Amino acid sequence: MKYKAYLIEENDGKFSGSIKELDIPSLDDGRVLIKVKYSSLNYKDALAASGAKGVVRSYPFVPGVDVAGEIIESSSENFSAGDNVIATGYKMGMAEFGGFGEIVHLPEEWIVKSPKNFSSFEAMCYGTAGITAAECVKKITDKNVSNSLPVLVSGSTGGVGSVAVGLLSKLGYEVHAITGKPNESDLLKEIGATEIISRHEYMSEPTKPLDKGIYASGVDTVGGDILAKMISMTSNQGVVSCCGNVGGASFTTSVFPFILRGVQLSGIDSAESPIEIKKELWNLLSNSWALDLSKQTKTVGIADIGSEIDKILQGGQIGRVVIKHGD
Ligand SMILES: NC(=O)c1ccc[n+]([C@@H]2O[C@H](COP(=O)([O-])OP(=O)(O)OC[C@H]3O[C@@H](n4cnc5c(N)ncnc54)[C@H](OP(=O)(O)O)[C@@H]3O)[C@@H](O)[C@H]2O)c1
């Protein structure tokens, strides 16, 4: 039996993707076979598809860190054929073939049952970007950060950033959004931002060791100098959640935000978060934290994955890209 997948192959150091028919693997102990209804595109998938170092162990490879679909075969006591499930992260899409294929063969420990009344499509509108945004926001709500000052979000038109804007706004925070695409201001306002800050203008003044603390907290999805500035502008007892590096991996800060304001820098690694945390986040996203993501989501087939990867690598993607399998 065969299934279709968007397979990345390496030839003479060049990486390219195409649709191929692959053999369905036989079921190993403690694993399940999932018929993937929807997957989604994340920055890490674009790195995996372009051969970036340190993401995928070996090629040919099927990327895709997100899947939602139905179990068709199970050797687990906890899951049965017919269960609707979601899986994100761990080694899927890095060492195990992922959601760019119609079938995945995953360890039961990586899977959660879909919350009731939550479709595979809805789950993948969030995907890894969505649960990462939720984890970033939860670091802020868990510390009961006051909503008397705005919260700053960077990379705000991106997958993680746009969901973070929506969640913070829904939870009663005023949201200021940093973006490299000020022409997307209308969309950012529609999804919950009240002030749009051009990335270029935000970074035009040098970062001070301790700037005016005008933000209650921050969600940084880009890293580098933007993260350093966000930390210096965070007010007393604020939290800065840090999850990404599209803008740079290193930054220079001072100790003052930490020792004079008690600012907390909170690292997020949603791929490896314990499965119980993922369950809790999916329950929030399907219930009290549920967002209407229709304005910031587009749906494509696997034939369109290549062009969507190019956009995400150029920093030009807006919102979320859901991948639909089947006709
Ligand atoms: N730690 C984790 O658990 C985790 C999980 C998921 C993702 N991530 C990371 O989070 C980051 C965002 O992921 P994503 O899926 O949201 O990607 P994405 O959809 O491509 O969004 C990234 C956004 O960052 C902004 N940006 C692009 N290039 C930039 C640059 N050179 N400098 C500053 N900003 C830039 C752009 O937004 P604007 O034009 O609006 O500024 C872009 O849309 C990536 O680094 C990804 O690897 C981490």
Image: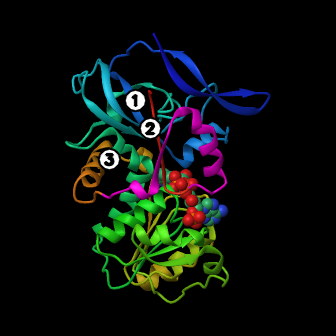
Residue 92 x/y as whole percent: 47, 34
Q: Is residue 297 left or right of residue 116?
A: right
For label 2, being within 8 Å of ligand 1 is answered no
The answer to which image quadrant residue 70 occupies is top left
Under mark 1, the amino acid is Val
Can you identify the residue that label 3 sits on? 278
Which element is circle 2 on?
A: strand
Closer to the N terminus: mark 3 or mark 1?
1
Three-letter code for the amino acid on which mark 2 is drawn: Ser
Neighbours of disc 3 within 10 Å: few (<14), some (14-19), many (20+): many
Residue contact between numbered discs 1 and 2, judged by CB atoms under 8 Å: yes
Does the beta carbon of the residue at mark 1 sit less than 8 Å from ligand 1?
no
111 w.r.t. 320: above or below: above
Q: Considering the image in quadrants, where does the N terminus appear? A: top left
| Mark carried by residue 39 | 2
Residue 200 shows up from this direction: yes
Labels 3, 2: front one = 2
Mark nearer the N terminus (3 vs 2): 2
Report the Cα–Cα distance between label 3 and label 1: 19 Å
Does residue 170 appear to the left or right of 196 in the view shown? Answer: left
Q: Is residue 200 left or right of residue 160?
A: right
User: Which quarter is ligand 1 in?
Assistant: bottom right
Which residue was labeled with disc 1? 36
Q: Look at the image and give the residue range highlighted in magenta.
A: 291-317
Q: Amino acid at mark 3?
A: Lys
Q: Which residue lies at the image location 38% right of the left edge and 15% below the top edge?
A: 27
Q: Is residue 248 visible?
A: no
Say which quarter of the image contains residue 224.
bottom right
Q: Marks 3/2: CA distance?
A: 17 Å
